[in-house]
Image (cartoon, grey):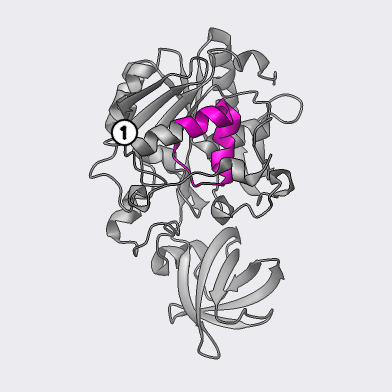
Amino acid sequence: MRLEQFDFDLPEELIAQHPPHHRGMSRLLHLNAASGAMRDLLFQDLPDLMAPGDLLVFNDTRVVKARLFGQKTTGGSVELLIERVVGPHRAWALIRASHAPHVGSALKVAGAVDVSVAERRGEFYLLEFGGPDTVLDVLERHGSVPLPPYIQRRPDEMDESRYQTVYARVPGAVAAPTAGLHFDEHMLARLRRREVDFAFLTLHVGAGTFQPVRESDIDAHRMHSEWYELPEATVKALERARGRGGRVTAVGTTTLRALEAAAQSEGLHAGAGETDLFIRPGFAFRIVERLITNFHLPRSTLLMLVCAFVGTELTLKAYRHAIAERYRFFSYGDAMLVEVEPGARLQRMPAA
C-alpha cells in the first residue's frame, strides 16, 4: 500500500493543546466495522457499551520525565530525549544540538550531572551518567514531561499528572499510552460494578511512536523496537474471556500491539521481549476484537494500525466524520471505540 492512502487534511485548531478539565470529559466515537455505523457519544458512556464478562486490557507503563537540557564542553546547548533506560547509569537517547556530539564527548545536564557519549547507533546515542544518582533519579529531579511535538507549548505542572494514566505503574515510557488518559478512578469503579474484568501488561512507548513514515511503499518502513512484558495473570484473563465468550478490548494501540506481538509465535505465553511489529492493512489479528484509541496523525503507523483493524476506507470515513463534528485530535484529544464482529477474533486466539 502507498503512504498517500493514509493521508487526510486536519484543521490545526482541532489538535488538542490541553487535556479536558477533568478526565473522562472527552467525546467518544463508536465505530462498528460490521455495520459501518457510527455514534457520537461521550467517554462517560463507555460502561454502557460493555457487558459483564468483557475484558479490558491496559498498558500500565509510566511516562518518565524524559526530556533533559544541558551543554557540551564547548558551551553549545543540547537537548536530550531519553529513549530507553538500559541500566542504572546508562540510557539510549536522541540528541538535538547544532552539531552532533562525537563518541567520547562530555555533556553537562542541568548544570549538575556529568554525562558521556559512549556509543552511537544511527540516530540514537548511548549515554553514561556519572555520579551516584541513577538515570531515573536524574530524570525525576531534572527532566521535563516529553510532550509530543504537535503540542506547541512548554509542559507545566498539570502535565505531570495528566500526561500519565491513573494506573501507571512501571516507569520507562517516553510517550503516554494516550487512550488510557481518559480513564479516572470513578470510571474504573463503574466498569467494575458492571462486572467488566481488567488485565494489565507493560509496553514502554518509545520515541519511535512519532517517527514519520518516509517510504512511499509502507512495506519498506521499519519500526523502532519497544520492550513489553505480558504477565501470566493477563494470559489467564484472556483465556477466561475466550472461554465465556467475553469481548477483549485493548485500551490503546500499544496494548493491542503487545498482545498481537505475543501471539505471533506458537501459542500465547507470558514473558518479556522486544517487538518491532508493524501492524498495517492485511495483518491477521488473533486476540483483540475491540480497540479504544485516540485520533492519530495523518500518514502515521498508528493510523495504519487502526485501518488494519477495521478497514482503511471505513477508518478514513470515521476521521472525516470526526473532523466535521469538531472532535479533538491526538494525545489530549477525544477517543474512538472501534470493534469488529463479536467473537470473530476470539475464535482464532492461539492456545497457550
The residue lying furthest to the left in this view is 21
Q: Viewer-proximal residue, 47 or 60? A: 47
The residue lying furthest to the bottom in this view is 74
Left or right relative to 114: residue 282: right
| Residue 163 in picture, x, y percent from top left | 37, 50
- Residue 90 can be seen, yes or no: no
Q: Quadrant of residue 189?
A: top left
- What kind of element bears circle 1? strand
Q: Quadrant of the N terminus?
A: top right
Q: Viewer-proximal residue, 178 or 132? A: 178
> Looking at the image, which residue is at 59% across and 39% down?
304
> Looking at the image, which residue is at 55% across and 89% down?
73
Q: Quadrant of residue 347?
A: top right
**Residue 295: within the magenta?**
yes
Give the residue at mark 1: 27
Left or right relative to 139: residue 219: right
> Looking at the image, which residue is at 53% across and 13% down?
342
The residue lying furthest to the top in this view is 244
Magenta segment boundaries in residue numbering: 293-317
Q: Quadrant of residue 284?
A: top right
Which amino acid does the dot numbered 1 rest on?
Answer: Arg
Type of secondary structure dominating the magenta stretch: helix
> Looking at the image, which residue is at 52% across and 65% down?
81
Q: Is residue 27 above or below residue 241?
A: below
Q: Viewer-proximal residue, 230 or 340? A: 340
- Residue 46 can be seen, yes or no: yes
Q: Label 1 neighbourhood size at 10 Å, few (<14), some (14-19), many (20+)? A: some
Left or right relative to 283: residue 32: left
Q: Viewer-proximal residue, 152 or 70? A: 152
Q: Is residue 161 above or below residue 36?
A: below
| Residue 256 in picture, x, y percent from top left | 56, 33
Q: Is residue 31 above or below residue 7?
A: above
